[in-house]
Image (spheres, helix red, strand yellow):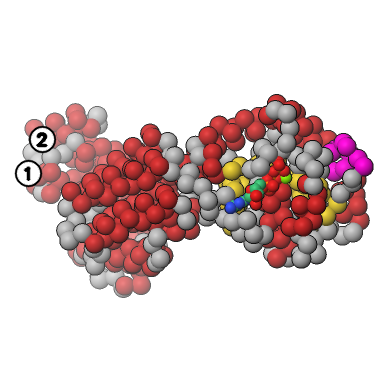
Amino acid sequence: MTSLSEMLKKAISKFISSTTVDEGAINELVRGIQRSLLIGDVNVEIVQKISENVKKRAVEEKLPPGISRKDQVIKIVYEELVNLLGEETAKLNIPKDRRYIIMMVGIQGFGKTTSVAKLAYYLKKSGYNVGVICADTYRPGACDQLEQLLRDTKIPVYRSDNEEDPVKIVKEGIVKLTSDGVKVVLIDTAGRHKSQDTLMEEVRTLQKEINPDEVMLVIDAGIGQQAGLHAKAFHEAAPIGSIFLTKMDTSAKGGGALSAIAVTNAKIKFIGTGEKIDDIELFSPTGYVGRLLGLGDIEGLLEKFRLAELEMDEKRAEAFMRGEFTLEQFVKQLKDLRKAGPLSKLISKLPLPGVQNIPDETLKSAEKQIEKWDAIICSMTPEERMDPHIINSSRIKRIARGAGVLEKDVKNLIKQYRIAKKFMKTAKRLPKKFLKTMQ
Ligand SMILES: Nc1nc2c(ncn2[C@@H]2O[C@H](COP(=O)(O)OP(=O)(O)OP(=O)(O)O)[C@@H](O)[C@H]2O)c(=O)[nH]1
Ligand SMILES: [Mg+2]
């Protein structure tokens, strides 16, 4: 692993072994993370943002039952780093039942030929019928290199040593490979041009003439945050469908390259993690960050959180059903419910007497009210939120003005809150099973 990883691991293990988790310990952890990310060539602004988020969340987020503060901080760091790379694991998205052409492009020495071989082998192992075309007419021995890499795989390599025009080679290659039953065709192109301009020109011509299903840009992770600009420049020559980021095993700047590409919205599909043919991975931000932090059991930690949070929700829902809730909790619960779907649909499912008789109109207007109520709650003092009894007419006036609503809206919220509380208290205790369905 890279030194970014080593530094991050050091910062994390220091934090884990600290005796208390106070502001000092959190600040030190954040400083360690900052240093590591900067050495990993992550953009300074991004580093600043992550540091702020970690500090803020570590102070603000409630500790779920049974979870230690340390675990919580680690989880926050993990989530912020994953967030930096976009959460989704890359998808292969290559059909098995029709011909699919992938053209690999990129600058000299970035790892195209190696990555073509890796990808071909990866796809073959995943059940695809793969063939490869060597369209590099610049680099002496380019086709031998490809054949050598694929020697033990039985993957066919098409080459045409007397032809100079890559477009012709590719066209002939596609015909030949397809007639042999190949479905996925990978094209290795040349990177050894006089300048980036002539390289782009060739990419543009190939794109136009061949019209591949996917153009995959190969980038060396060693260029760090430059990778973002690079991806953009190539995208202008030919729409880039995906990115293969190589040399993640040897480059200290892999983190910077990944994060810079992530902000361009380009999709990193694969990473190269060594020189051998099976040193290839479908890119997963969660997997990458987990390894970066050296957290062996990040999944276990996340699961612990999910369970604790579920328990917290369940407790809250039970209290709610017993009529034990403050005005603020009342509005929050309604908002949470609404996130799960239209209020009317949810309420109609309640196994409560009389629920079916609540007029639709009431429910619809309740939905509209929730946003208003949220604003009203915001303009209340903490005491008022805890105990609405103290809200007299002058307070109502102030709250209404602060929330930009009418006084009758404030009165209405308090009234609805009282009705809901009474309703819940008198309703029969709900079976646990139902409470689960509410989450
Ligand atoms: N450690 C490591 N080395 C890699 C990786 N990918 C490629 N390489 C090495 O990088 C060097 C250049 O790789 P090539 O595949 O020849 O690069 P290319 O882009 O085809 O180069 P041109 O054909 O000259 O444009 C080789 O020594 C590869 O072994 C990787 O993921 N990790
Ligand atoms: Mg090559």
Residue at image point 13% right, 40% down: 381
The vertical placement of 21 against 407, above or below, is below
Q: Which residues are magenta?
A: 162-171
The residue at the far front in this view is 140
Q: Quadrant of the C terminus?
A: bottom left
Q: Could you say where residue 165 lies in the image, as x and y percent from the top left?
A: 87, 36
The residue identified by callout 2 is 395
Mark 2–mark 1 CB contact (< 8 Å) = yes
Q: Is residue 269 magenta?
A: no
Circle 1 — which element?
A: helix
Q: CA distance from mark 2 to mark 1?
A: 9 Å
Residue at the spot 76% in from the left edge and 66% down from the top edge: 152
Q: Along the horizontal axis of the image, is 108 left or right of 365?
A: right
Q: Is residue 170 visible?
A: yes
Nearer the observer, 356 or 197: 197
Residue 172, quarter of the rendered image: top right
The residue that disc 1 covers is 390
In front: 356, or 151? 151
Check disc 2 and give the amino acid type.
Answer: Arg
Principal secondary structure, stretch drawn in magenta: helix
From this view, report whether residue 165 is shown above or below residue 150.
above
Mark 2 is surrounded, within 10 Å at the Cα level, by few (under 14), some (14 to 19) or many (20 or more) other residues, namely: some
**How many other residues sit within 10 Å of disc 1, few (<14), some (14-19) or many (≥20)?**
few
Left or right? Give the position of 93 relative to 329.
right
